[in-house]
Image (cartoon, grey):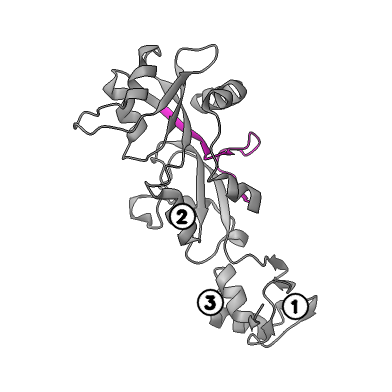
């Protein structure tokens, strides 16, 4: 692979500007293969170079993919005019310039949210033509009714007359107030509006999967993790909804109940 400048390599993978990188290099804060490098225009191989800045290793991957277990009270935006953004939850060492949430969860909703600086992947993930399935678990104000299943499968007509794509819904185990929903589109407040259309009300919503990428049980609310290549590939894979519900109902039901306490 063609070599690139050290400052370009660091700038593309961190929040540092080129001028800041030049200053850090002059102060001996940048190492290449364990050796201090004081010239930020040094040429390196981006695939193999071992670069550290202030003791923090800089990975070779051009883009970063972060899975956040979003808590309530944060907005999915890069602009904080509407409140604290989800970007504030990311540790400084994994942030890069140009990071943004790929998709949305309402301010009062929780669960799986992808944050990245890869615009092309985000476009593919959000594009209506790809129909990436997303699964949610919701706490309902009134008991789940079995007629919801056919209504969701036939395409719910929202209050404004808009028709949703066919969706799947299933009651969680051992309770009639929790349900799983699988959508293949992302209209504004869609899950809440769909349940309102059948006479119910969503009290809390948690997204638990994006494609075949399942929110890890051990990833606590407010925590995040950097995704591996295989995890990113799972974003574009499907999984069986029924099997998912059977396998994860006890786990995510408990998680949602704990977040109501």
Q: Which mark is residue 32?
A: 1
Work out how far the residue at label 2 is from the one at label 1, CA to CA, in angstroms: 32 Å
Work out how far the residue at label 3 is from the one at label 1, CA to CA, in angstroms: 18 Å
For marks 2 and 1, the one nearer the N-term is: 1
Compared with residue 233, is residue 188 higher up or lower down, i.e. above or below?
above
Residue 195: image x %, image y %? 33, 23
Q: Label 2, on which residue?
A: 122
- Mark 2 lies on a secondary structure that is helix
Query: Would you say residue 228 is visible in this rendering?
Result: no
For marks 3 and 2, give the one nearer the viewer.
2
Compared with residue 200, is residue 182 higher up or lower down, i.e. above or below?
below
Residue 214: image x %, image y %? 58, 37
- Quadrant of the frame with the N terminus: bottom right
Residue 110: image x %, image y %? 47, 37
For marks 3 and 1, give the one nearer the viewer.
1
**Per the image, is 208 magenta?**
yes
Q: Residue furthest right?
A: 34
In the displayed structure image, the side of residue 158 where residue 33 appears, left or right: right
Decide: few, some or many residues near mark 1? Use Cα within 10 Å; few <14, some 14-19, many ≥20: some
Compared with residue 191, is residue 63 higher up or lower down, i.e. above or below?
below
For marks 3 and 2, the one nearer the N-term is: 3
In the displayed structure image, the side of residue 10 where residue 141 appears, left or right: left
- Mark 1 lies on a secondary structure that is strand
Work out how far the residue at label 3 is from the one at label 2, CA to CA, in angstroms: 24 Å
Residue range (magenta): 204-228
For marks 3 and 1, the one nearer the N-term is: 3
Decide: few, some or many residues near mark 3? Use Cα within 10 Å; few <14, some 14-19, many ≥20: some
Question: In front here: 45 or 27?
Answer: 45
Question: In front here: 179 or 166?
Answer: 166
Q: Label 3, on which residue?
A: 17
């Amino acid at each position: 692979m063609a070599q690139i400048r050290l400052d370009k390599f660091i700038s593309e993978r961190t929040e540092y500007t080129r001028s800041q990188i030049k200053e850090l290099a002059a102060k001996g804060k940048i190492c290449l293969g364990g050796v201090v490098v004081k010239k930020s225009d040094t040429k390196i191989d981006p695939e193999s170079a071992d670069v550290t800045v202030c003791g923090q290793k800089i990975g070779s991957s051009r883009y970063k993919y972060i899975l956040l277990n979003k808590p309530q009270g944060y907005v999915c935006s890069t602009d904080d005019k509407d409140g604290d953004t989800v970007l504030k939850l990311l540790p400084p060492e994994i942030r890069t310039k140009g990071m943004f949430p790929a998709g949305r969860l309402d301010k009062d909703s929780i669960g799986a949210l992808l944050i990245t600086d890869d615009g092309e992947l985000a476009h593919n993930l959000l594009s209506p033509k790809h129909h990436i399935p997303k699964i949610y678990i919701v706490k309902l104000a009134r008991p789940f009714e079995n007629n919801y299943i056919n209504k969701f499968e036939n395409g719910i007509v929202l209050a404004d007359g808009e028709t949703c794509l066919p969706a799947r819904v299933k009651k969680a185990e051992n309770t009639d107030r929790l349900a799983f929903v699988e959508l293949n589109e992302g209209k504004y407040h869609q899950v809440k509006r769909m349940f309102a259309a059948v006479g119910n009300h969503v009290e809390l919503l948690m997204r638990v999967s994006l494609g075949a990428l399942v929110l890890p049980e051990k990833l606590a609310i407010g925590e995040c993790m950097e995704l591996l290549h295989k995890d990113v590939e799972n974003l574009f894979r499907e999984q069986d909804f029924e099997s998912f519900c059977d396998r994860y109902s006890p786990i995510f039901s408990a998680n949602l109940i704990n977040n109501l306490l």
